[in-house]
Image (tube, helix red, strand yellow):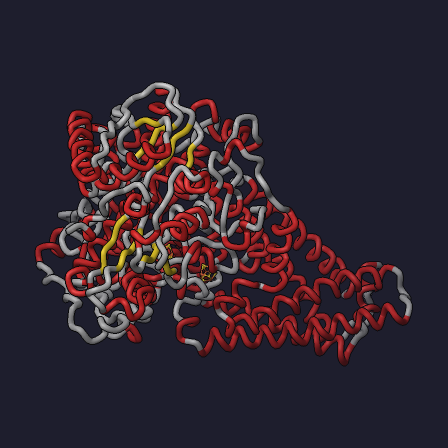
Amino acid sequence: MEAALPLAIFVIIALAAFLLLSAKKFVDYSRWSKHARFDLYPVPKEGSKKNEYGGSYYEENEWWEKGRSTSAVTELLDIGQEMFFIRKLFIHQRGLWYFSFLFHFGLYFLFGWSVLLLIGGLIYPCPEWFAVIIGIVGYIGFIIATIGCCGLLLRRIFSKSARINMTPIEYFNLFFLLAVLVTGIISWLWFADPIVIAHEVFTLSLVNVPPIVIAHLIMLGILLIYIPMSRMGHYVGKFFAFHGMWDNDPNTAGSKVEQNVIEMGKRQPKDHWAAPHTQA
Amino acid sequence: MSAAQKHWKAKDIAKDVEVLSPPDDLSTLPEPYASNGLEPDYKAKKPEWAQRYCASLDGFVALDTLERPENEEAKKEFVERFLVGLEKLFSEVNANTVQPLMLTTDFCAKCNTCSDSCHIYLSSNGDELLRPSYRTDVLRRMYKKYFTPSGRYLGGLVGADVDVTWESIARLGELAYRCNLCRRCAQACPLGLDNGLVAKEIRKLFSQELGVAPTPVHDKGTMLQLKVGSTTGLTKAAFLDNLEFIEEDIYERTGRKIKFPVDKKGADMLVMHNAGEFIAWPDNPAAFAILLDEAGVDWTLSSDMMGYDSVNYGIWYDDVQARKVALGQFKVAKELGVRRIVVGECGHAHKAIAIAADRMTTAEDRVPVESFIPVMAEFVRQGKLKFDPSKNNFPVTFHDPCNIVRQMGIVMPEREILKACAPQFREMTPHGVHNFCCGGGSGIALMNSYNFSDYRNKVTARKKFEQIINAFGEDFTNPDVVKYVCAPCSNCKGTIRDILKFYSATSTYNVQYGGLVELMVNGLASMEKPYLEFLQD
Ligand code: SF4
Ligand code: SF4
């Protein structure tokens, strides 16, 4: 009991840290969200079917006199396809897409599984059907994420073009993920019931934890803290990156963009560029 | 060296070799160029270039203002200044761009998905150095090494392994000019990252901090424009003379007496041309005048120092210069009291004044900006411009200028016009927002110092030439069939002019080029004689 309690606390702290560090990253990037325009078409929110071929409101004669047609639905659809299906990778690099898709989709399942476990742990003992759903989601998540992770790792090891500029830390990241996945599979298949463990973690009553489960939970906790601080935290960046390219709202009088421009004009950076022509 | 051997690591940018990666293994052009022997070789390099500048990246020199320091002390000082600038790039002073820059350097997964979208990488047969993400990787590693705790303490383990020396910095600067800033790579990135933007940021660091930029874009570019009014050196007096000459020419060729309206207060539209047109392609502003006259428009040109050249090279390399030029141009429009600015056939001028300058100041200091393309398309729709398509009955293909199409979303109006006036119009593959850059984008069209034009003709514009050959199919090799590459952008047009000459495609196969408005005038039902020079007897 004494040894397991810190472990339970650590897992809870790690979960909270994952959320807080991701949120911090989000806040850090939002600090720079008032920026110049970087339009890149197709912009999915462009209405009147312009999104389909990459058109914009600039195609209209005297565009500023005409009502602008935008669609939140097409934008959401596009975001969805990029998030869940990694569509650009599917179009441009199918070979990598298979593994990347499995890996990411597996992680989404595992994320869902974690939420279900949280619920299952809190309402413990949960109904049989709920336990079955938790089991299915977990199986699918672990299997496809592990296949995807192995595929990505093998590509990084054997493909010369993928290998050439990888840093040791980038191999470490995938090995680390794989270790967490594999210890998870072993733990939950043969050594413990994840619903029971979840219940014991969230009620701080963790006892009799097999060593492999301890190892898994420690690694999982470290991973959760590490992800938002590493390049694996790109789930935050992707949001800003696409929005930067799709932010084509014109700076018209009285608009939100104009407000931002006014605020941008008030910035007083402490540094200045040094080349003589920048001073004039 | 074959491209298969060009597996450069980021840290190789500092490698102690005379030339790191010469572009000597290029993609094979389609027939007839795969076998007709018409592709010239590179001009011989002179050893003194390498002694004076950094020619050690690939043997070419873009940064003709970056001279090798005379001693170690000067080298050290340069490295220190670079590092100061590198830190600024990621700080408040660069707030307008920090977010996309940081995202690209922070998150690139090196999946290489963007590589096959880059015409330069493809033309080099996959030289690692020209991968869109390579220069980002170098920049990231340099930054990491000096400005992050992980880089300082873990070094190579986290990739902070690039030596920051005069040579590696200079090569990085050169590498930023082996990119057209076309951003086709960014369209493909699954994470929405933008290596084109990173290339621009490297150029910015060089210009705004180190005072280093190619002469044609800075000294003879923005600086000249801000001093005399145009990057061509065209003064107000010369500009007005030029207009008179063009008016006479229009009369001689078409019998139409058209006077260019100049500085007309309160006109509906201020038309702004790339001043290069008045000098190199006067048929283009003349065609505009003919079309606007026929459509009965209330328009004007400006003879103000900041009003007769629409260009703004600043957007390629220097935000400070871009701002000075753009605000100057808006001021002219405001003072004239025009209702709108209509940008003529210059792609980067479109992007500069419509997109880049859009958030430089509030609406009060600007006037609405639009492209000439939807304006002309509307005239066609309204029947103000009527065509006799049989006058343009020859194969026409269309090059989409990146700045107007991929980066501004003007795709269909030009096609509407072409379909109305060019019965044999055929698309390039790919086309629209996915078309490839001409190879001259972002100043590369203007850079001819030392051997750089060879690099453009053989490497950066190679893909465009391939697309042109393919677009004309069997007609390409038939010199009896005149073929027209339509490119509504001065820089694209200049690049295409150069490749058609370089590969002898005009003289051997009768491939011509020009803008959209010239083709429109040629197809006007009211024209008595052909307008396009190559159709005249
Ligand atoms: S596609 Fe995006 S993530 Fe992949 S290498 Fe290119 S920039 Fe990096
Ligand atoms: S911006 Fe264009 S030229 Fe530059 S790396 Fe990307 S695709 Fe290549």
- Residue B477 falls in which quadrant of the image? bottom left
Where's the N terminus of chain A, which quadrant?
bottom right
As drawn, is A21 to the left or to the right of B195? right
- Can residue B176 be seen? no
In front of the other: A267 or A88: A88
Q: Is residue A81 above or below residue A44?
A: below
Where's the C terminus of chain A, which quadrant?
top left
The residue under the point 52% across, 60% down is B190
* Residue sitting farthest toward the bottom: A190
As drawn, is B486 to the left or to the right of A133? left
The residue under the point 63% across, 75% down is A146
The residue under the point 13% across, 56% down is B50
The residue under the point 78% across, 65% down is A4
As drawn, is A225 to the left or to the right of A50? right
In front of the other: B165 or B301: B301
User: Whole-percent x and y of residue B335?
Assistant: 36, 19
- Residue B526 falls in which quadrant of the image? top left
In front of the other: A217 or B535: B535
